[in-house]
Image: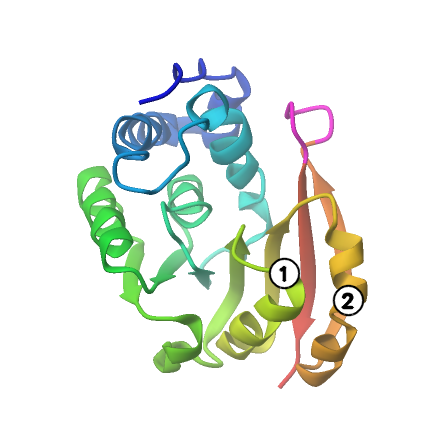
Amino acid sequence: MTGVLEPEPAVAAELFGDRVELARAYTAALAQHGEKRGLIGPLELPRLWTRHILNSAIAAPLFPAGGIAGDVGSGAGLPGLVLAIARPDVRWVLIEPMERRVAWLEEQVGALGLENVDVERARAEEAGRYEGVLDAVTARAVSALRTLIPWTAPLARDGGELILLKGHNAPAEIEAAQKQIRKFKLSDVRVEVLGEGVLAEETRVVRALVRA
């Protein structure tokens, strides 16, 4: 493995509360096995907490209590597993097409004892049983917004929400996705910046309401 795992930032305990030990266990497992299993790149260890774990966890309060949320293209479990640790009051569906990543997700769900998680091996457009069902749909580092909207919006119920973790280009991505925003009847499309003054790297989230 390349590099040394970043020390846990103090804010991790604040974001995860009494679930921080689960977050530590997941982070340690990802650090140990992530590169070898093709889940993270070789340069990610020195910024694993900052760039990946906390970047995902900061969005946890946005999801509706008691709801069902989907993570499209869950991969290593970013953000889905992190959010499932932080929000045990939400039911999470991790949608991932690649068998080796599905195996990793299922291993982690078992190892961490996460009873609020289902893993679905499917492409988003093939996850038909969740179509129009989910209260919220998220994704991180999957694709540009104009590609991501057709994958995520159909899974949300009428009045559900897209909560998509994006980078600095989020406003430009919204501009480039106007056709898809209209086609899938998204409203109140906006960028929210999370973690200002709390995280070393802020998180940008594109939020939108979905209407049937």
- Colouring rule applied to residues: rainbow
> Percent from the top left, x then y, of residue 65?
50, 55
> Is 87 within the magenta?
no
Kind of residue at disc 1? Ala
- Give 141 or 88, whichever is nearer the viewer: 141
- Give 100 or 136, whichever is nearer the viewer: 100
SS type, badge 1: loop
Q: Which residue is drawn at 58% across and 44% down?
A: 59
Query: From the image, which quarter does the C terminus lie in?
Result: bottom right
- Give 68 or 29, whichever is nearer the viewer: 29
The residue at which mark 1 appears reads as: 144
Q: On the rendered structure, is 151 left or right of 30?
A: right
Q: Residue at x 31, y 22 (%)?
A: 1
The residue at which mark 2 appears reads as: 176
Q: In this view, does 147 lie above or below 114?
A: below
Q: Is residue 93 above or below residue 14?
A: below
Q: On the rendered structure, is 106 left or right of 143?
A: left
Kind of residue at disc 2? Ala
- Give 90 or 185, whichever is nearer the viewer: 185
Specify the principal SS of the magenta part: loop
Q: Is residue 9 above or below residue 53?
A: above
Q: Which of marks 1 and 2 is nearer the N terminus?
A: 1
> Percent from the top left, x then y, of residue 77?
38, 46
> Percent from the top left, x then y, of residue 57?
51, 38
Q: Which residue is drawn at 44% across and 13% down?
A: 7
> Percent from the top left, x then y, of residue 104?
24, 47
Spatial distance from mark 1 to mark 2, Cα to Cα? 9 Å
Confirm or deny contact between disc 1 and disc 2 (CB under 8 A): yes
SS type, badge 2: helix
Q: Residue at x 77, y 66 (%)?
A: 176
Q: Is residue 29 above or below residue 184?
A: above
Q: Give the range drawn in magenta.
A: 196-202
